[in-house]
Image (cartoon, rainbow, N blue to C red):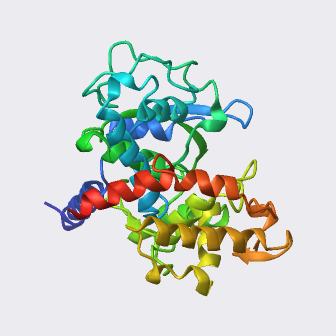
Amino acid sequence: MPRHVTHTAGALLLALSFSHAAWAREPVLSARQQALMATVVGSAAHPRILQVRLDELHPTQPAIGYDQVYYKLGRYAAEEKHIADIAKPKKFADLCEANGQGDVLPGTANVAGATLAAPPAGYRCKAAVGSRPDDMKTVVIGPRGIVYLTDGHHTFSSFWDADGGRNHQLQVWVKVSDNLSALDEAAFWTRMREENKVWLKNGGNQAITPRQLPSAIGLTSLGDDPYRSLVYFTRGIGYDAPANATEFLEFYWAGWLRGKPEVDLSRVDRLDRASYLAAIEAAARAMAALQPGDIVSGGKTAQALGWTGVFSQAALDDLATPMGKLGYAIAYRKALAK
């Protein structure tokens, strides 16, 4: 065989070898990934809604407020003990709301042992899926069709951990705010940062990288930010979430409260109602005492973050009742401590 033919054949084999090696390194996209990457985004008036499993959702924040989830789990568990008497079980009401369907219809879901993933046969919501899009959670489609959750980490983590953890493949409906699947990883995270759709601080307020974000929702994957819980409990007492609120609104308040000596959570017993309630009151009063133009954190003003200038004693009193959110959270926390 002529030398130049041998050389050409060798070069071809080498090229094919490199091509095969590159192909082998590229993960093969599943039909589901390809379908997600082809998702067409709607408009604000007519958003595109998408059905996803909980285990498909990737967080865009590393931590949540555990006590907010504990309130939900505590209430779900308490209602289960006398479910026949609960006309509208909270967990099914939450599922209806998250799917943009309003409330659960009375008497359709109060069956003992029913789970979110396996609801009663008669389970019904007041409206069709997506009828109330403002109540729905949002996602971004990223590279390789990965679904990134940008709102709803607490709600969906509550679903994930409810019913003894049997809801990981529960299907829920979400709004698609962006499809950025055509971007590479670096460009994707740059865009997410620019549009404030990722929170890169952990539960201790320390900076992290996108690679350090958890790969799943739920209490075992996401860390705990106790100040995020504190902000949740002050809602309606020291501030109110505004319409079209900025993403991660509560984390801006949490960052500000970390610098307040009167709400130093290291000195608060979160198993003691009086101790926890005193911290909530101190935080809410500090919020209400701000002026609307005061910078809270991250360049956000108090007014932009839902400042009202009013402290609500009535809302605080309601929170403190045994059937209030704080009561359920503490009861669940105590049950875990046993």
Residue 144 visible, this orientation: no
Q: Is residue 47 above or below residue 273?
A: above
Place of residue 125 in the rendered image (x, y in percent of width and height, measured from the top left): 51, 20
Q: Nearer the viewer, residue 216 or 312?
A: 312
In the image, 213 versus 77, the foreground residue is 77
Is residue 210 shown left or right of residue 280?
A: left
Foreground pick, 283 / 12: 283
**Which residue is outermost to the top?**
122
Q: Position of residue 103 (x, y in %)?
A: 55, 26
The x and y percentages for residue 57 are 41, 48
In which quarter of the view is residue 213 placed? bottom left
Q: Position of residue 28 (x, y in %)?
A: 30, 46
Q: Is residue 137 above or below residue 227?
A: above
Q: Residue at x 29, y 54 (%)?
A: 23
Q: Is residue 100 above or below residue 277?
A: above
Residue drawn 41% across and 74% down?
Answer: 269
The quadrant holding residue 267 is bottom left
